[in-house]
Image (cartoon, rainbow, N blue to C red):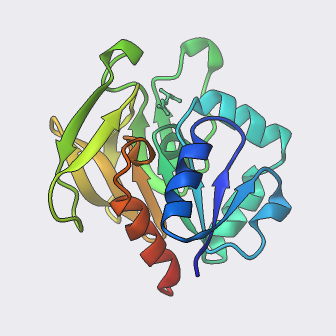
Amino acid sequence: MARIGVLALQGAFREHRAALDRLGAQVTEVRLAADLDGLHGLILPGGESTTMARLMSEYALWEPLRAFHARGGQLWGTCAGAILLSREVQGAPPQFGRQDSLGLLDVTVQRNAFGRQIDSFTTGLDVRGLTGAFPAVFIRAPAFARVGEGVEVLAEYDGQAVAVRQGRVLATAFHPELTGDDRLHDLFLQGCLTPA
Ligand SMILES: NC(=O)CC[C@H](N)C(=O)O
């Protein structure tokens, strides 16, 4: 059985937890470095990336998360979680300066690439590895504006990459945990149970 953590500092972690529960995974809410012990994979949920980054500093999680990746852990970031995984972040308000990120995914991510909260939308998306359109919920979603050589684009919307994978790191600009369609969670779980 896959043991999966959900970073539970802020944002939509309960919804991810519910999807993983439906699929029969063993789920841990991660707030401290020690919570990562023994996990196969970790989901970084959507929410507000600057707030989450601040809490990650307060809980001293930056290095433990990088170490989790280095020792073979699988990571999946959705929306704000995808921003946190990226190498470079654009679109943070100038007063905040450069936005910290984990740098585990060789992309430049553009925050709020599809407009404000009021511009939120759902669309049927073709995602590589899935059969049939996936209902993708975009809420102040980012886009992967630059995609590095080793990064595979799994889905595009309006000419922009919105789902990517690099080795053990998966990132989606949209929110699969809000749809009741658990196929992407299932794909992630399969990856967690397959040795890299
Ligand atoms: N739904 C979301 O996770 C939005 C992300 C948010 N726009 C950010 O930059 O952090």
- Horizontal and vertical percent position of residue 192: 51, 76
Q: How many marks?
A: 0
Identify the residue at image location x=45%, y=23%: 91
Left or right side of 110 for 72? right
Decide which of 89, 120 is in the foreground and name it.
Answer: 120
The image quadrant that residue 164 belongs to is bottom left
- Horizontal and vertical percent position of residue 176: 39, 48
Identify the residue at image location x=68%, y=68%: 68
The relative height of residue 45 versus residue 189 in the rendered view (above or below) is above
Question: Extreme bottom residue here?
Answer: 195
- Horizontal and vertical percent position of residue 138: 34, 32
The relative height of residue 137 versus residue 77 in the rendered view (above or below) is above
Decide which of 193, 115 is in the foreground and name it.
Answer: 193
Identify the residue at image location x=39%, y=28%: 139
Instruction: Quadrant for the N terminus, please.
Output: bottom right
Question: Extreme front residue here?
Answer: 22
Decide which of 6, 161 is in the foreground and name it.
Answer: 6
- Horizontal and vertical percent position of residue 18: 55, 53
The image quadrant that residue 108 belongs to is top left
The relative height of residue 46 versus residue 191 in the rendered view (above or below) is above
Identify the residue at image location x=33%, y=36%: 137
